[in-house]
Image (cartoon, rainbow, N blue to C red):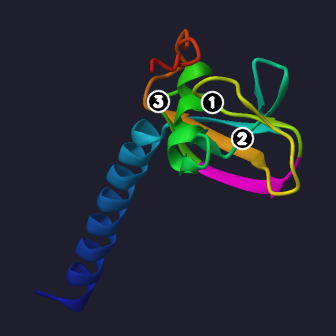
Amino acid sequence: MSAMNTSLRRTIATAVVSAGLSLFAGTAQALEGTFSRPTYKGLARLDNCYVWGRECGQRAADTYCRVQGYERAVRFTTERVRPTRIAVDGQVCNADFCVGFATITCSTSQPKRGKGVGWPQRID
């Protein structure tokens, strides 16, 4: 086999693999939406914790995303802010230690976001 044939075969193989990866990447992308200064029912910034002082971060962000019609949170940032409201029951945090979400980026594997769900209700 000549060097020219080997080079041509490599070029064709690379092009085929690249085209396949591009096609796969195009169909595998999720729909994302980023929310700045997300709130609890429009009343106050959403607290970083799902329950007062517990389950902070991912669970609270995921809850917000489900309310908005997405499947989950893929990124979020937080900041000290007051007042905030807790996701599970709307309890208010109005102290210097309160931490709320600055941004939440939500994702869904669907072509568009869904209807969303209501805020959770705490059952004691």
**Which circle marks residue 87 in the picture?**
1
In the rendered structure, are the residues bearing label 2 and label 1 in contact, judged by CB atoms less than 8 Å apart? yes
Where residue 114 appears, as percent x and y from the top left, is: 52, 14
* Residue, disc 2: 47
Is 68 situated above or below 115?
below
Q: Secondary structure at mark 1?
A: loop
12 relative position to 32: left or right = left
User: Quick one: label 1, few (<14), some, or many (20+) residues within 10 Å?
Assistant: many
93 relative position to 18: left or right = right
35 relative position to 76: left or right = right
Is 28 situated above or below 111?
below
Residue range highlighted in magenta:
75-81
Q: Secondary structure at mark 3?
A: loop
Mark with earlier residue (2, 3) = 2
Task: Determine which quarter of the picture holds residue 51.
Answer: top right
Where residue 14 appears, as percent x and y from the top left, is: 33, 68
- Which residue appears farthest toward the bottom when viewing the image? 3
Q: Quadrant of the N terminus?
A: bottom left
Looking at the rendered image, the disc whose residue lies closer to the viewer, 1 or 3, is 1
Q: Is residue 1 magenta?
A: no
Q: Quadrant of the C terminus?
A: top left
Label 2 amino acid?
Answer: Asp
Rounded to the nearest angstrom, the CA distance separating label 2 from label 1 is 7 Å
Mark with earlier residue (1, 3) = 3
